[in-house]
Image (cartoon, rainbow, N blue to C red):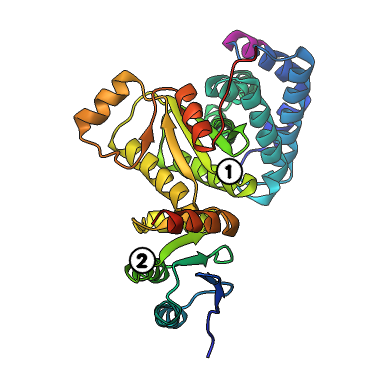
Amino acid sequence: MERIPILQMGGFLLVTIQVDMHDQLALTLQDDLSERISKTSARGVLIDISALDMVDSFIGRMIGTISGLSKIMDAETVLVGMQPAVAITLVELGLTLPGVSTALNVERGMKLLQERVRNQ
Amino acid sequence: MAALQTSTLDAMKNNQAQLLAEWKNSLEASGATRNLKEKDLQQQTAEFLQLVISGLQNGNDQNIATVGWDEIRQFLDKLSHSRALLGQDSHQTASFIFSLKGPLFALLQNHYQDSPALLAEQLWEISELLDALGMHTIRTFQKSREAVIKRQQEELLELSTPVVKLWDGVLALPMIGTLDSQRTQVVMESLLQRIVDTGSEIAIIDITGVPTVDTLVAQHLLKTVTAIRLMGADCIISGVRPQIAQTIVHLGLDLQGVVTKANLADALKLALTRLGLSVNKAD
């Protein structure tokens, strides 16, 4: 079955979504990610969605849910690289993802994560 | 309904020069020749008369939508288009055709002096034809004008949404004019795209040039701010004038979570501070 890889980088987990998200894939990612956070006790999660150029309301909500659940498991989450079209779609759908941290690209996201973890 | 008589056609053909001269006089009298070159007018009138005669000669009926009238319709399209560009109004454009009625009717009256019934019939026919042609001219004139307006609207839309780079990593968008859904969409798209292209962390939206802020405009602004935040950049709204601040408070609009500044300078200062930069006076 198709899966989205979750890479470990030091104390952080890196999730790069390179394919078109469909509903089952998003649910699997949610399970996998929570599993990995608890196993590795990661302090931060970076979700890169720069390759995602289309979202529907379900995927939009899943992105919010995944960020939310990592936060509950004490891992700071940063969503990076959202495309303009995706941002506009989410706003029009009313999914403003409150409480989710964002950054322009992976590099800035990493910096933000490190700062957050250091300040804790 | 009876068709045009051949003798009518012949009368028109044989008296072209006289018709043209009288037509020109009546055009001048009606003021339709303003802004037009004498030579162009002469050429246009001659061409039109020629086309009408040849159209009638080919045995076409009065329905100008048929293939036989293609040539004259194209001529009129071109004519009304050029009139629209010259800034003439619909009255002047329509007068071009309707002014032909006078001289033409006079000619026919002269020609059918002895048979009033035939005269009435022929007058009706010619009148119908000229009316149809006149209507067609008005319609294309209107279309040309609408096209001009549409193009100008698009140009205005493009012109009014420049995204300016103020500093490395700081973009500014000076908004001018009323914000509606369509403009917000264009503004949002161009700003978000520039953020991606330049990797800017801070975007300043300056609303000094926005005359009024109502609930709808505020909603559009909030949408833009949220989209910018989702992309991972920060947004500052600057240029909130006293009246606008009062309106926002009176309307009970919730601008929480949005950083607002009174003017662009303050916003730039904040942006520089956030980037860890400072501006100092040189000694």
Residue at left offset 67%, top offset 12%: B35
Residue at left offset 68%, top offset 27%: B82
- Tell me, for residue A71, which label it has, or none: 2
**In this rendering, does residue B81 appear at all?**
yes
**In this rendering, does residue B150 appear at all?**
no
**Which kind of residue does numbered mark 1 sit on?**
Ser
Q: Secondary structure at mark 2?
A: helix
Q: Are marks 2 and 1 in contact (CB under 8 Å)?
A: no
Of the pair B19 and A105, the residue shown nearer to us: A105
Q: Is residue A90 above or below residue A45?
A: above
Q: Which residue is mark 1?
A: B200
Where is residue B70 drawn, in percent x and y? Answer: 69, 45
Question: Where does the magenta region start and end?
Answer: B25-30
Residue at left offset 48%, top offset 53%: A115
- Image-quadrant location for residue B236: top left
Of the pair A5 and B99, the residue shown nearer to us: A5
Of the pair B18 and B4, the residue shown nearer to us: B18
